[in-house]
Amino acid sequence: MSTDIPDSHPRKVSLEMRERLVHGWEQKVVATAGLFAHGRGEAFDYILGEQTHAAADSAIEAAAAALLLADKPVISVNGNVAALTAKECVDAGRAASAQLEINLFYRCLEREKAIEQVLLAAGAKTVYGVGEDADSRVPGLESERGKVDSRGIFHADVVFLALEDGDRTEQLVRMGKKVIAVDLNPFSRTAQFADITIIDNIVRVFPLLIEKIEKLKTKDKTAVWKIVDLYNNKKTVGEVIKAVRLKLADMEKKGIFMEVPKE
Ligand code: PTJ
């Protein structure tokens, strides 16, 4: 079932995102729990004003730089990411010469294949982590997320991941990898443990990331290294939390949330 959402609807973009997830759920791409996870993300996005904050923008720039400098970068794809941004994953992978690997919490071959199909249809040439290809394990991680591809995440130096429960980020960092995480919740374990935390909606992140990768490709390597070296993740996460606090304080002070425009 899909509803035609009129252009005039003030929540059109948000409602369309939900439709994509429901469609993904019907195709077995999205886990049932993925729908709840999206709801949590929506709530944080609402508080963030559904916009990319300046601090998130600098995290995206650092992510672009880290991906470009990596020897073996990998973009980790789960159900929600594939349903919302399959084409963008492929485009970012191409721009940064990064591999795409499917990594799921609710892992089963049916979902792995469904997500692989979505990525191939979006233009991917190779997709790692499907079935027997997930032949290695992240040490210390007992969940299905621990299953990784030896050609991909297991030997990667930089891993880009999004929208996931927190335990894997910590272990990947312990393995010595640089982890770039996209998570709208600045308090999550993923957000706290990642080396570069992008607190923004994945649908806004990818287009900006691709743009920044292309721009940094034209710069010399020293300038790109400088971006990574100067980046401070604690400061970035703190700045986003501060922006939210100031916005809420301002709304509280004004005591007005919305006004119906007069005819
Ligand atoms: O596809 P699978 O099997 O790997 O399962 C994926 C889910 C999402 C079910 C699993 O990873 C999960 O349960 O995740 P959590 O613990 O709910 O965490 C998801 C995080 O992503 C939450 O902190 C949300 O705020 C955040 N989030 C949700 N939607 C978005 C988002 N962050 C960025 N952009 C979004 N669109």
Image (tube, grey):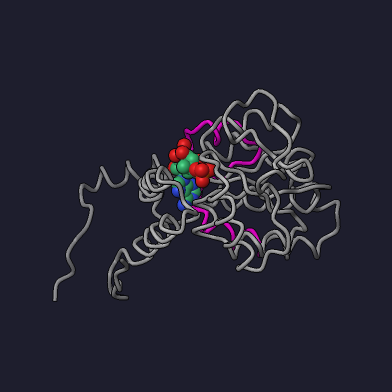
* Residue 188 drawn in magenta: yes
- Measured as percent of width and height from the top left, residue 164 is found at 53, 40
Q: Is 261 left or right of 37, judged from the image as shown?
A: left
Q: Could you tell me which residue is drawn at 56 percent across and 46 percent down?
A: 162
Quadrant of the rendering where the C terminus is positioned = bottom left
* Image-quadrant location for residue 7: bottom left
- Measured as percent of width and height from the top left, residue 58 is found at 62, 50
Q: Is residue 173 above or below residue 74?
A: above
Q: Could you tell me which residue is drawn at 68 percent across and 32 percent down?
A: 172
- Measured as percent of width and height from the top left, residue 52 is found at 50, 55
State whether residue 208 appears in this view. Answer: no
Residue closest to the far top: 140
Q: Please state which of residues 181 and 108 is positioned toward the viewer in this rendering.
A: 108
Q: Is 36 left or right of 134, judged from the image as shown?
A: left
Q: Could you tell me which residue is drawn at 76 percent across and 60 percent down?
A: 216
Q: Could you tell me which residue is drawn at 31 percent across and 66 percent down?
A: 1
* Residue 57 drawn in magenta: no
| Count of numbered labels shown in the rendering | 0
State whether residue 33 appears in this view. Answer: yes
Magenta-colored span = 182-211
Q: Please state which of residues 214 and 173 is positioned toward the viewer in this rendering.
A: 173
- Measured as percent of width and height from the top left, residue 145 is found at 60, 36
Q: Is residue 180 above or below residue 117?
A: above
Q: Is residue 8 above or below residue 201?
A: below
Residue closest to the far left: 263
Q: Is 149 left or right of 54, judged from the image as shown?
A: right
Q: Is 115 left or right of 49, judged from the image as shown?
A: right
